């Protein structure tokens, strides 16, 4: 018994040390970023007496006032909305069809949606640009030519979020019940299935948005001024303001992912409660 208790204490101590190590590993770089971004004292002159002096949001305010910042962020948000719409239009019917009609093809569909992780973005862009540059220059000239690339890049995340939502419900029973009550296919999908996978749809949309708002390689190769490319250029010109903008962007992405997690947790809790009541 004593050895079992000792093992438990060792396990708890190991878990606590692991958590502390992870916090330190992630927190120290963020604290260093915050100090560099918002404290206007050189590192060589920093000591305990002036650790809390000359902190200012001046660099961040200047970045927010830059017209190029608003233009690039607006473009990235537009690209995110377009990518979300096309991704859902393509992958939601595909996932529903795979679950309802061809469940034996689900492994194949999952494998196809993983291909964007196999092909490097730079190879994809170079190949597509070489193909379209001589035949459809109007396509590459548009800022929104990035949307198809972002749709492909976000496909693995979108499909898995939708697939997880469909696996969590009894899809076949729901659709058959709706059909027996006189609903058509589209009515059953829109009024019965979609409300039950609403959390997955929202989660997949936010994941697509985070991919678009953080993607740099494709945009810079196609010479587009999206938010990530603007951030890289601004950081070279104004290191402190650029670092502050990167920190705020990282914080916003983290809040977005926490929001997604909260949605899924709430949905899972409601489903468990309904199961207990039943």
Image (tube, helix red, strand yellow):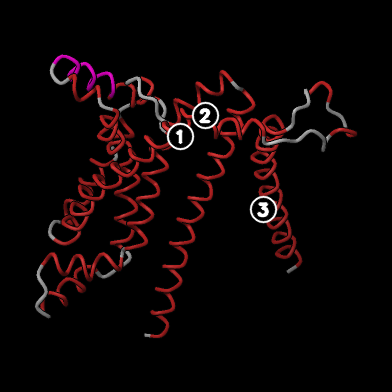
| Residue toward you, 60 or 145 | 60
According to the picture, the residue beneath numbered tag 1 turns out to be 70
Q: Which mark is residue 133?
A: none
State which quadrant residue 244 falls in. top right
**Helix, strand or loop under label 2:** loop
Q: Residue furthest bottom?
A: 277
State which quadrant residue 93 falls in. bottom left
Whole-number angstrom distance, CA of label 1 to CA of label 2? 7 Å
Whole-number angstrom distance, CA of label 2 to CA of label 3? 46 Å
Please tell me which of labels 2 and 3 falls first in the chain. 3
According to the picture, the residue beneath numbered tag 3 turns out to be 15
| Residue toward you, 114 or 80 | 80
Residue, x 41% and y 67% (percent of image)?
Answer: 267
The quadrant of the image that shows the C terminus is: bottom left
The quadrant of the image that shows the N terminus is: bottom right
Q: Position of residue 242 (x, y in %)?
A: 58, 28
Circles 1 and 2 in contact, beta carbons < 8 Å: yes
Q: Position of residue 204 (x, y in %)?
A: 35, 51
Q: Position of residue 61 (x, y in %)?
A: 61, 35
Dominant secondary structure (helix, strand or loop) of the stretch shown in magenta:
helix
Residue, x 23% and y 53% (percent of image)?
Answer: 92
The crowd level at tag 2 (other Cα within 10 Å; few <14, some 14-19, many 20+) is: few
| 146 on left or right of 54 | left
């Amino acid at each position: 018994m004593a050895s079992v208790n000792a093992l438990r204490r060792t396990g708890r101590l190991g878990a606590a040390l692991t958590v502390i190590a992870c916090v330190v590993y992630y927190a120290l770089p963020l604290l260093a970023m915050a100090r560099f971004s918002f404290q206007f004292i050189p590192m060589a002159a920093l000591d305990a007496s002036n650790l809390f002096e000359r902190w200012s949001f001046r660099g961040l305010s200047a970045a927010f006032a830059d017209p190029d910042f608003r233009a690039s962020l607006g473009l990235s948000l537009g690209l995110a909305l377009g990518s979300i719409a096309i991704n859902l239009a393509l992958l939601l019917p595909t996932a529903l069809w795979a679950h309802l009609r061809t469940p034996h093809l689900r492994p194949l569909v999952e494998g196809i949606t993983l291909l964007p992780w196999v092909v490097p973005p730079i190879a994809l862009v170079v190949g597509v640009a070489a193909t379209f540059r001589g035949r459809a220059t109007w396509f590459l000239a548009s800022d929104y030519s990035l949307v198809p690339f972002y749709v492909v890049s976000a496909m693995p995340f979108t499909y898995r979020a939708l697939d997880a939502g469909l696996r969590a419900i009894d899809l076949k029973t729901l659709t058959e019940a709706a059909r027996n009550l006189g609903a058509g296919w589209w009515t059953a999908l829109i009024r019965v299935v979609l409300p039950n996978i609403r959390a997955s749809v929202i989660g997949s949309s936010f994941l697509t948005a985070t991919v678009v708002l953080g993607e740099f390689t494709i945009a810079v190769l196609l010479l587009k001024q999206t938010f990530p490319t603007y951030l890289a250029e601004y950081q070279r010109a104004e290191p402190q303001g650029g670092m502050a903008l990167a920190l705020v962007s990282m914080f916003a992405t983290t809040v977005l992912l926490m929001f997604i997690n909260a949605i899924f947790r709430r949905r899972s809790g409601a489903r468990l409660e309904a199961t207990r009541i039943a």
